[in-house]
Amino acid sequence: MRNRGLGNTAIAGVTVMALCSGAWLLHSGNETHAPPQPSAAQARSAQGDGAGRDAAPALPPSPPDRIRIPSIRVDAPLMGLALTRTGSLDVPPAAKKNLAGWYEAGTTPGEKGTAIVAGHVDNAEGPAVFYDLGALGKGSAIEVDRRDGSVAVFTVDAVEVYDAKGFPDEKVYGAAARPELRVITCGGGYSRATGYRGNVVVFAHLTGSR
């Protein structure tokens, strides 16, 4: 059961850097394997993206079971994520590279508010579930299978990359007046000493359901 009282404010100020060790790059010693990063063209415009009439009505709360992003060949189950003892967002087991997670104390994907999904970019064996997240473009579709049998369909508004020291907590985790989704992995350059330097964040809003 979700502790709805925590909401996304519980992870404000916390990025998901546990996703970001860069185990594959460190193991292989070859930084040419670095995952794609979003271009400036995919950033949110000054006018705001996705604010038009295509927003769909909110769905009732229902836990998600699977996420699909066809344009980058993602089709993965979702597990619930909680907070660690230090207050950071926990992460899926690194060994399960085709597994993502959602913050189950917050908003469920499709209901009003900001739902959070996170997953690894790689593990020691190679690319993981969100390796190509930085290549996602505006207008791409994200589908989330929900436990009530419905599918929440989101449209990507922007894809941005942030350095860990300048992570915009309110922008990413803040409350929304409509159903929105954030999909997060690591990125922002790579250092053999510290791993990835930041996070790739996808901003999307609900545009349909079935």
Image: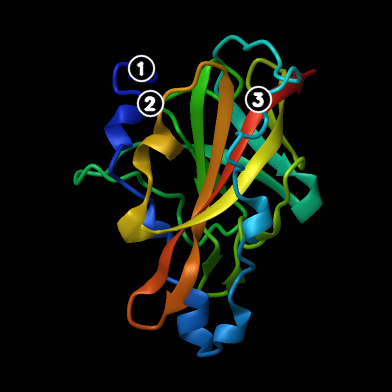
Horizontal arrangement in the rendering, residue 2 relative to residue 114 (left or right): left
Residue at the spot of label 3? 51
Picture coordinates of residue 99, whole percent (x, y): 58, 50
Pointers 2 and 3 in contact (C-beta within 8 Å): no
Residue at the spot of label 1? 4
The residue type indicated by label 3 comes to Ala
Using the numbered discs, state the Cα–Cα distance from disc 2 to disc 3 in whole angstroms: 26 Å
Tell me the residue at 65%/36% (across/down): 66
Q: Secondary structure at mark 3?
A: loop
From this viewpoint, which residue is outermost toward the front? 46
From this viewpoint, which residue is outermost toward the bottom? 29
The residue type indicated by label 2 comes to Ala
Quadrant that contains the C terminus: top right
Few, some or many C-alpha atoms within 10 Å of disc 3 (few <14, some 14-19, many ≥20)? few
Picture coordinates of residue 13, whole percent (x, y): 28, 43
Q: Can you say whether 195 is above or below 80 in the image?
A: below
In the picture, residue 49 is in which quadrant? top right
Residue at the spot of label 2? 105
Q: Can you say whether 29 is above or below 99 in the image?
A: below
Using the numbered discs, state the Cα–Cα distance from disc 2 to disc 1 in whole angstroms: 6 Å
Pointers 2 and 1 in contact (C-beta within 8 Å): yes
Q: Colour scheme in the image? A: rainbow
The residue type indicated by label 1 comes to Arg
Between disc 2 and disc 3, the foreground one is: 3
